[in-house]
Amino acid sequence: MKPVSAALIAAILCAGPALAKPKKKAEPVEIVTADWRKTATASDQDRLRDWRSAFIKALDKARLAGNSESIAREGRLLEPDAALEAAAPPAGQYRCRVIKLGAQNPRMADYVVYPVYNCSISDEGGVMGFAKAQGVQRPIGLFFPGDSRRMIFLGTMMLGDETRAMEYGRDSTRDMAGAFERIGEKRWRLILPKPRFESMMDVIEIVPISDQQSRMGSLALAL
């Protein structure tokens, strides 16, 4: 067994959009010892260390801008201490919804909710791959084992029409670090403290496509 390295992250990131497509058959992969601390940059370790204070400050700024009701409607998704036990998700296809909290620029909104996009989670052996397949800003990277309530995300941001991800650690403005948590039955979130662009905190809601379609079907029948 060997530790996950920046090279392994680079290899998975370079798969780019391929991670967002369902695999026909699981391929054998080498088991790795996944210690995120041996891979994360110093600045990303600082971001992860301060995640809770960053979350609270971003929420406070969004509330002061008149978004208290919208924040309350999201329930556990926007509660800093909502993480539940057993964070690891099954591999598969998911729907992702991004909420940006607390603008870095006074000319930008302090609370922004983006449309739902497709994303995927894959089993990479000892770690899990994550890729947001659509949108102008597309996080892609790895979930490392963390503690009983969260996994640690390290990755990079793909922008615009880019087809290949940048290697983690090469450009600090593209590096991403966060915590992946389960917040309900078949409901997860990825919290990204102090992102380099636009906001003070990004929160990505992640739910299985099949589960979301089932809920929408039930709602249609009720109507």
Image (cartoon, helix red, strand yellow):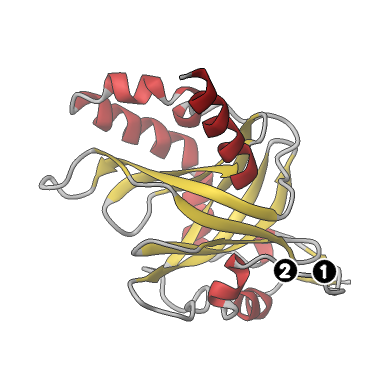
Viewer-closest of 186 and 9: 186
Viewer-closest of 213 and 206: 213
Of helix, strand and loop, which one carries label 2? loop
> Mark on residue 26?
1
Within 10 Å of disc 1 (Cα), the crowding (few <14, some 14-19, many 20+) is few
- List the residue tagged with mark 2: 23
Q: How many marks?
A: 2
Question: Residue 124, image x and y in percent?
Answer: 75, 66
Check disc 1 and give the amino acid type: Ala
At a point 70% along the width and 47% down the height, the residue shown is 146
Question: Residue 160, image x and y in percent?
Answer: 33, 72
At a point 39% along the width and 79% down the height, the residue shown is 162
- Left/right of residue 36 with respect to residue 160 in the rendered view: right
Question: Residue 106, image x and y in percent?
Answer: 12, 45
Check disc 2 and give the amino acid type: Lys
Of helix, strand and loop, which one carries label 1? loop
Does residue 137 sit above or below 182 in this rendering?
below
At a point 26% along the width and 31% down the height, the residue shown is 62
